[in-house]
Amino acid sequence: MTVIPPGRRMLRLEVRNAATPIERKPPWLKTRVRTGPEYRDLTALVERENLHTVCQEAGCPNIFECWEAREATFLIGGDQCTRRCDFCQIDTGRPAPLDRDEPRRVAESVATMGLRYATITGVARDDLPDGGAWLYAETVREIHRRCPGTGVELLIPDFTGRPDQLAEVFDSRPQVLAHNLETVPRVFRRVRPGFSYARSLQVITSAREAGLITKSNLILGLGETPDEAVQALHDLHEAGCQLVTITQYLRPSPRHHPIARWVAPDEFAELGGIARDIGFAGVLSGPLVRSSYRAGQLYAQAQKEIS
């Protein structure tokens, strides 16, 4: 069944995508549920306080491991993005008005959950004069004010490369500034038309020049070749990226981009080794890795390498 977002018809691209049935997952993508005391405590707390995390709402397979380490991810800016990436489950549409109280509420959730490390991600807000830069920056500032011992990773859109908007975000001083490249140049325009490969690399360069630890993500299974993936890793490292996650594309629905291939665990291991040889300070590569997977652990690893 193809779920059509309320209020709009399917795009031609979505109709073409839907002609390809959802692919059957290979056996290595099946996970076992392993819960511990920290996970159970957080689950009860989230339900009791009516908190919202990407971890739960996106059905992330790594929630058990991350919550056991007191790490969680929050989505800001609403549930409608002003851009459309063909692999992303967040829908495209007209966003709700800016909620200026959201940074406080997110920071309170981080404090209530007693998180050691929080990842903040969000939608593109091209409808706002500042592209949403204040919202991203203020969320980091609020968490730092209320939870000074909590590490903050901020995963941002490109703010169309605007130096003033990027500067406001960088000045909030997250522990890690992430911007996801996602794929290789040949595939990029087709699956990520609202972004630019070169501009995404420049965002990472600008963040590194601002003195921030930088991070990005590369998705496999969108149509890239292994050699193209290796070249993208070189491009990221040359741009100043220090941490990288390498992930398997999992198709959110029939209207999204079909999966070009399932990448075997040994290929992920090989590519992770190549990334380390290239010089990344921290690498996580695997079929079930997500861009925010064990983010605090990767940050701690990078600190040792960088120092």
Image (cartoon, rainbow, N blue to C red):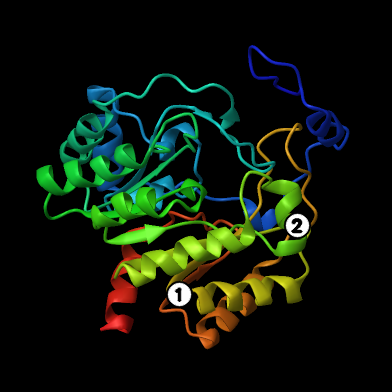
Q: Quadrant of residue 173?
A: bottom left
Q: Nearer the viewer, residue 22 or 79?
A: 79
Rendering coords of residue 11 (x, y %): 78, 26
> Amino acid under label 1?
Gly
User: In terms of sequence position, does the residue under pointer 2 or pointer 1 come before the other?
Assistant: 2
The one nearer the camera, 27 or 119, is 119
Query: Can you say whether 261 is above or below 11 in the image?
Result: below
Query: What x and y, as percent, mark residue 168?
Result: 29, 50
Count neighbours of disc 1 (C-alpha within 10 A) and say few if under 14, some if 14 to 19, many if 20 or more: many
On screen, 180 above or below 105?
Answer: below
Q: Which residue is mark 1?
A: 240
User: Which residue is depicted at the point 16% across and 49% down?
Assistant: 144
Give residue 131's position: percent from left, percent from top. Answer: 43, 38
Q: Mark 2 and mark 1 in contact? Answer it, CB < 8 Å.
A: no
As drawn, which residue projects farthest toward the top?
Answer: 7
**Quick one: label 2, few (<14), some, or many (20+) residues within 10 Å?**
some
Residue at 42% over, 58% down: 178
Image position of 110 (left or right of 15): left
Give the residue at the far bottom of this rendering. 277
Position of residue 280 in the picture relative to residue 199 (left or right): left
Above or below, 283 relative to 114:
below
Q: Which residue is mark 2?
A: 187
Q: Which corner quadrant of the image does residue 288 belong to?
A: bottom right
Q: CA distance from mark 2 to mark 1?
A: 22 Å
Q: Secondary structure at mark 2?
A: helix
Q: Quadrant of the N terminus?
A: top right
Amino acid type of the residue that numbered disc 2 sits on in the rendered structure: Val
Picture residue at 24% right of the left edge, 46% below the top: 140
* Residue 302: % across, % down: 34, 75
